[in-house]
Amino acid sequence: MSNLDRQATLSVCGGRGFVVAEPVRELLTPRQVRLGESTEVRRLLPNLGRRMVGAWAFVDHYGPDDIAGEPGMQVPPHPHMGLQTVSWLHEGEVLHRDSLGSLRTVRPRELGLMTSGRAISHSEESPKPHARFLHGAQLWVALPDAHRHVEPHFQHHTELPIVSAPGLTATLILGELDGATSPGTTYTPIVGADLALSAGAEARLPLDPDFEYAVLSMSGQAEVDGVPVLPGSMLYLGCGRTELPLRADTDAGLMLLGGEPFEEEIVMWWNFIGRSHEEIEEARRGGMESSRFGDVKGYDGGRLPAPELPPVALKPRGRVR
């Protein structure tokens, strides 16, 4: 699910101004965002006071939605630049098409990883027929300046490394965790993992003290470092941790997100990540044409029109803690 918000605001993110250099427990409340006529998501990043976690720059949690007899996800072709999209499902399927000619159906706990690089267009939709429920997360990873103009490409990994402990199964989405390495291509030190906890489980997950971390609750009742985290909310954990205590009262699903603090300041608007208002403005103009971002073949419908771009860029307002 990409950013379909017709009131998209321009945000300055990144830099070390918002990074907390010590362990904290900062519970982030999601913002409800309506995408289209019938879909509502819980947006965790960017959040008031918390713009990024490592290179993770955008997190939407959606569902579980009962889409029996409904079209389900319908995201028309639209452009991206300067980022990677991560499609992660707990229930349902998403059919991915892009301007490179990729056509893949992403299923639960499979990695759909699209690197936009300099420019790409794609669409996302529920297949016909499709499962009754749709539940997942859409995440973006900001590309560093040295790699943000790479050639676009799409990866679909159906088999991912598993890290396990009594009561805990961790599926590694990106990066490295406890000696395991994801096959997904990364451009900054980062980690993303899906954590499945059994009822009554107590576990400690090894962490890198140089990373900042956050945990998104997908389902069930779990405590993260002693803090109850309800589904659809996220707990920011700061840096300086070597392990993370986890406990579950019921079967629970979490997502661990982390990485080295992203030092570069970025400008994020709609489905673009750049470095200046002028660059975003140029991308918006190019996004209305197929020559820069390419055509998506096979989608039954037109391109998604870009919203109006605010005339003045926001100024950075970071804080050092």
Image: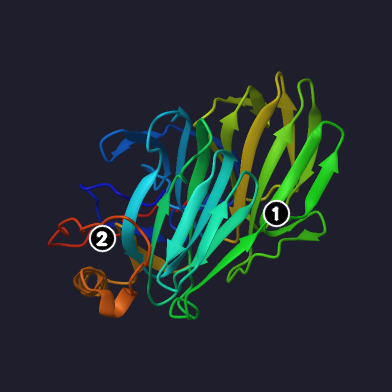
| Residue 93 found in image quarter | top right
Judged left or right of residue 195, residue 289 is left
Q: Determine crowd level at label 1: few under 14, some 14-19, many 20+ residues with C-alpha closer than 10 A.
A: some
Which residue is situated farthest in the left direction here? 311
Q: Return the disc, 2 or 1, that comes first in the chain's sequence.
A: 1
Residue that badge 1 annotates: 209
Name the kind of residue labelled 2 in the image: Arg
Q: Determine crowd level at label 2: few under 14, some 14-19, many 20+ residues with C-alpha closer than 10 A.
A: many
Judged left or right of residue 65, residue 184 is right
| Residue 220 found in image quarter | top right
* Disc 2, SS: loop
What separation in Å lies between label 2 and label 1 (alpha carbons)? 44 Å
Judged left or right of residue 65, residue 21 is right
The residue that appears at 61% across and 55% down in the rendered structure is 111
The residue that appears at 78% across and 40% down in the rendered structure is 169
Label 2 or label 1, whichever lies nearer to me, is 2
- Give the percent coordinates (x, y) of residue 239: 62, 50
> In this rendering, is residue 33 above or below 74?
above
Q: Which mark is residue 288?
A: none
- Give the percent coordinates (x, y) of residue 257: 60, 49
Can residue 126 be seen here? The reply is yes
Name the kind of residue labelled 1 in the image: Pro
Residue that badge 2 annotates: 303
The residue that appears at 37% across and 55% down in the rendered structure is 318
Q: Dots 2 and 1: beta carbons under 8 Å?
A: no
- Give the percent coordinates (x, y) of residue 289: 22, 73
Judged left or right of residue 179, residue 53 is left
> In this rendering, is residue 159 above or below 137?
below
Can residue 22 be seen here? The reply is no
| Residue 303 found in image quarter | bottom left
